[in-house]
Image: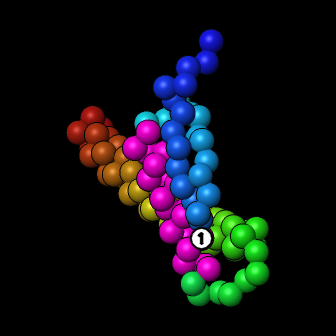
C-alpha cells in the first residue's frame, strides 16, 4: 500500500507540484530548487513567451551540464585507469626482478 509520507510539495517556476518518491526529502527539495533556479535564470536572460519554452530551455541547459560532467568524469576515469595500469606494470616488473 502506498504511503503519503513520501509526498513532498515543491514550488517550481511559480507552480506547486506534489512529488512522490523514495529519495530523501531534502534531496528532492534540492533538485526542485535547482530546476526552479534554472527556469528563473532562463526567464531572466532569454525573453520567451511561455512556461513550456522556459522549461525546455532550462532542460537543455541542465542536459548540457550533465553531458559536460559525464565527459569530464570519463576523462578522469581514463586517466585513473592509465595510472593503475602503469602501477600494475611497475609492480609486475619488481616482482619479476625478485623472483627471476
Q: What residue do we see at 28% from left, 40% from top?
A: 95
- Quadrant containing the N terminus is top right
Vertical placement of residue 42 versus 15, above or below: below
Residue 29 is inside the magenta segment: yes
Q: Which residues are magenta?
A: 25-43
Toward which corner of the image does residue 14 lie, by quadrant?
A: bottom right
Vertical placement of residue 6 versus 27, above or below: above
Residue farthest left in this picture:
98
The chief SS type of the magenta part is: helix
Seen from the viewer's position, the closer of residues 81 and 56 is 56
Vertical placement of residue 60 versus 6, above or below: below
Can residue 31 be seen from the camera position used here?
yes
User: Would you name the residue on which mark 1 appears?
Assistant: 39
Where does the image place residue 45, in percent across and percent down from the top left?
Answer: 59, 87
| Secondary element at image label 1 | helix
Seen from the viewer's position, the closer of residues 38 and 64 is 38
Amino acid at each position: 500500500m502506498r504511503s503519503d509520507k513520501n509526498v513532498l510539495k515543491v514550488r517550481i517556476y511559480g507552480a506547486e507540484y506534489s512529488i512522490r518518491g523514495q529519495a530523501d526529502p531534502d534531496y528532492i527539495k534540492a533538485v526542485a530548487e535547482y530546476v526552479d533556479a534554472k527556469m528563473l535564470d532562463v526567464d531572466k536572460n532569454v525573453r520567451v513567451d511561455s512556461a513550456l519554452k522556459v522549461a525546455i530551455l532550462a532542460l537543455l541547459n541542465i542536459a548540457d551540464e550533465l553531458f559536460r560532467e559525464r565527459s569530464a568524469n570519463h576523462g578522469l576515469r581514463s586517466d585513473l585507469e592509465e595510472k593503475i595500469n602503469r602501477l600494475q606494470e611497475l609492480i609486475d616488473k619488481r616482482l619479476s626482478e625478485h623472483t627471476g
